[in-house]
Image (cartoon, grey):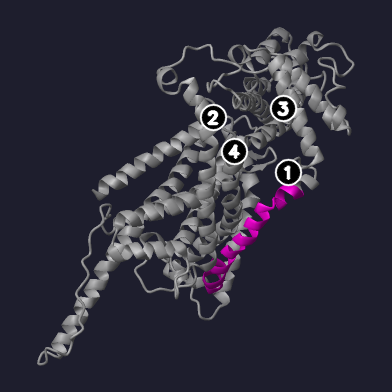
Amino acid sequence: MSGVALALEVVVVFFLALFLLHRYGDFRKQHRMVLFATLLAWFLCFLIVFILPLDVSTTIYNQCKTDNQVHLVAIKTVNHDNSSNSSVFPTQRVPKICQKPWSYIPDGILPVFWRVVYWTSQFLTWLLIPFMQSYARSGGFSISGKIKTALIENAIYYGTYLLIFCSLLIYVAVTPKLHLSWSGLRTIGITAANTWGLFLLVLLLGYGLVEIPRTYWRASCHGQLLAKTYFKAAKLMTEKADAEENLEDVMEDVRTVNETIKYNHPLRKCIDTILKKCSVEYQEKMGRNMDDYEDFDDKGNPYPSKKSLVKLHKQVIYAVQRHNRTQVQWQILLDKAFHLEDVAKNESSSTHKFVHSFPSAEPPGWISKYLYTPTVEWYWECVFRRWCYRVLAVVLCVFSAAVVWSECTFFSTQPVLSLFAVFIQLAERDYNYVYIEMACFVTIFFLCYCVYSTVFRIRVFNYYYLAPHHQTDAYSLQFSGMLFCRLTPPLCLNFLGVIHMDSTISHQTRQPTAYTSIMGSMQVLSFIANGFYIYYPMLIVLLCIATYFSLGTRCLNLLGFQQFVGENDLTSDLVDEGRELIRRGTTDTGPSFKLSSRYINECDLTCVCAAQSRRDRSDKAELLQDVEPLDFTGEEPLETDNRRSVLLYL
């Protein structure tokens, strides 16, 4: 039964990682090595989360057997020394009845399993993925050129972490009580990696513990959710306009070098590689404008160097990816805004039937026809959904409070103050392994959800951005896999410390789990084991307070990064602008918008004008009134400019 449980969890975790990768990545266009590295990183991290509860239950069973063996040895020793007096040991305790858990994993399997999983994930996060990031982002035209670029870019990266490792190594070398050994060096490396991961873990966890319950609570407030959607529409339109301008500038550079370098030039292969990254329409346009019978002349105009073409290739990849992403995101945001507006209109319906502004042209399926009828949809969208979100938000808030309390008190063993440790110890007395595993899984799953969802939420300008619907670039995919591999080991150690299953932190004499056995004794660096690992997680209280009052959002807003902060003039102006953009997307394209076109065209032109005007005008109230629907530059209409017309429809 134990082998079946382990195999089943491995299969479930694999398909979970594959599903997420399919949602965010693009199997058809992205490099196979990029997809493989990301899938392997996500799979290993999720696998640790799912298998660790089995390790806890197996350790509790092994601890019971060990206690019985020690007790029996003690009884035999006393009886042997006092064989003449049978009443010398009147209080001898009956040995415990150790019930084997249903998911018991035999000895020797878990240590090997954790060793393979841990060191594979460390190899990915510190060596392979950083190299693959630079390789995938490189604009080189050959494998050797991309490898050279990746090695140069990662030289500083590897040097920084090597400096941290050497600093810890020097500390151990100059400490008289510590002796260097292979086991000690391994522990130093693990400690350095876990220390870096714990530092980032607390930051992400402090944000997620507050923001996740608040997100679900705000989702129940329909008016605020619709206002935030309008706000996102205004911001996204600005990004969309910038992406189109950037793509147009890059395509102009491509057109120039394409006309300069003819078919028999040595660098023509590089130009063909760049053109393959462009849209089909642009490739056809370049093919029509090219004279295949005109030879190049070495004595003529200077030709671009290969280095400049590598840079241009990199710019094309980024510009096309960003343009496609903003187009798809705008379409999705429009669908969401239309749906929220439909909910607002149907809330006052007396017929209690949900009516869509843009009904689907496809015939309703079996579920929509018999189960999810318009009446059921009305009750769900207008009544039950908000209450489900509120109940879920309250439950998550209780979990967050329990995590914060346990993170601040898990080092106290007498009395036991950590709530999760109390729950596990109560179940351990009765050897209720099902409850132990479920409690461990729910706890670590909630911690991982807070941390991982924050990784999916954060956005570092346009440098790192996980976008759903297959719009995430290769660099961001691998960056997320690298973060997961660095965050999961310290998260698991922190979880084991919270439930008092890590003797290094709780200072209890008990059998360690197989997972902690591969970490070695953190006492090699006592100032980290007894100080940083115990007291640093307490900073989560300050981070939760800062997140609750949105201090980070307000600071970004003061620095010029537009954020949704509620009662604010700029926020109100952007909400009004987004509402107008959504209205134009409805009226300009008509009811057949969602059926006949993947991207909006006429709305794009008017929205580009609005976004451009907003950057140049300080009076937000008159923003949309002063914008011309088509001709906003004073130049010729867009239809007469073939190059610009083609680019806007890419």
Q: Is residue 385 left or right of residue 549?
A: left
Q: CA distance from mark 1 to mark 4?
A: 16 Å
> Which residue was labeled with disc 4?
219
Q: Which mark is residue 381?
A: 2
Q: Within the magenta stretch, is there residue 545?
A: yes
Going from N to C along the chain, the mark reached first, 2 or 1, is 2
Disc 1 marks a residue whose amino acid type is Val
Q: CA distance from mark 3 to mark 1?
A: 22 Å
Q: Residue at x 33, y 55 (%)?
A: 435
State the image coordinates of residue 283 (x, y, percent, origin top left): 66, 14
- Camera-side mark, 4 or 3: 4
Frontmost residue, 402 versus 516: 402
> Main SS type for the magenta part?
helix
Extent of the magenta region: 526-555
Quadrant where the C terminus is found in the figure: top right
> Which residue was labeled with disc 1?
565
- Camera-side mark, 3 or 2: 2
